[in-house]
Image (spheres, coloured by chain):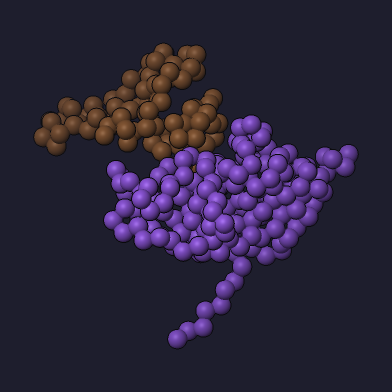
Amino acid sequence: MAELIATPAVTGLPLTIGSVRLAAFDPGPVTAIAPYPGRDLSPVLRFPAPGEVIEEGARRLIWAGRGMAFLTGGPAPDLGGLAAVTDQSDGWVWVTLEGRDVPAVLARLCPLDLRAAAFPVGTSARSVLQHLSVLLIRTGPEAFQIAAYRSMAGTLLHDLSGAMKAVAARAAL
Amino acid sequence: MRIPCPCCGPRDRREFTYYGASVFLDRPAPDAGLEAWDAYLHLRENPAGVTRDLWYHDPCQSWLEVERNTVTHEILSVCPVAEARA
């Protein structure tokens, strides 16, 4: 049996520039749940509405796109015949972005309305970060978790650190 | 320009990919004849005014049929293709 070595998707983290800290985040196993058309999952689990993040203890069910949710922090229930259930743990890279100037950093990259009224704490959104398709979860007024395709980890880091440097440079003027 | 995604709410144009006129959904029958297929593949209206076209919302992976005005940039209606053609 081959010995498999786990390697991090990103290196050089955590990174603090100005008031913003970018760090790697390990959500543990990630399972995508995509209900089959017309199937009702409610006897087994409540499927999140667009933007909803359902937290039950350590378990999180995160809305991650049209007809798709990511389950983290626990094993997937048996959804045989109801939904397509796939392991996405190795498919995505996750980072946290925290600090006073986080809205200014994201505003340079992402067209989302980041005001608290439009994007409240404890909700998720799919959007773009420059040219990357990402999943954003707001964990605090100035704190986000960001998930992108693992193959794009370098680009994610490049875009975020570039915007962090630009915001910090502007603040230092 | 902003397009109201039925799933995500109003979103910037940068999140969308344009696919062309919505007549692309009206695929002729295989035996409809050369003329119908030629029109389906190659002929498109270019109206100054109301038009219907297809947009893909990349982040949430929805195909949308959007009715909009090319003169005023007004978005008149948005419907997910999965529902419109179900």
Task: Report whether A80 appears left or right of A153.
Answer: left
Q: Is residue A92 visible?
A: no
Task: Report whether B46 appears left or right of B5.
Answer: left
Nearer-the-camera pick, B85 or A38: A38
Nearer-the-camera pick, A103 or B17: A103
Q: Position of residue A172 (x, y in %)?
A: 88, 42
Q: Could you say which chain is coloured purple in the image?
A: A
Q: Quadrant of the C terminus of chain A?
A: top right
- Quadrant for residue A169, please give it: top right
Vertical side of B1 occupied by A29: above or below = below
In this rendering, the count of numbered labels is 0
Q: Position of residue B13 (x, y in %)?
A: 53, 31
Q: Quadrant of the N terminus of chain A?
A: bottom left
Q: Residue at x 79, y 52 (%)?
A: A17
Q: Residue at x 31, y 59 (%)?
A: A80
Q: Residue furthest bottom?
A: A1
Q: Residue at x 64, y 60 (%)?
A: A25
Q: Residue furthest right?
A: A173
Nearer-the-camera pick, A77 or A169: A77
Vertical side of A109 occupied by A75: above or below = below
Q: Residue at x 52, y 79 (%)?
A: A4
Q: Position of residue B64 (x, y in %)?
A: 39, 32
Vertical side of A139 occupied by A71: above or below = below
Q: Could you say which chain is coloured brown in the image?
A: B
Q: Is residue B76 visible?
A: yes
Vertical side of A4 occupied by A146: above or below = above
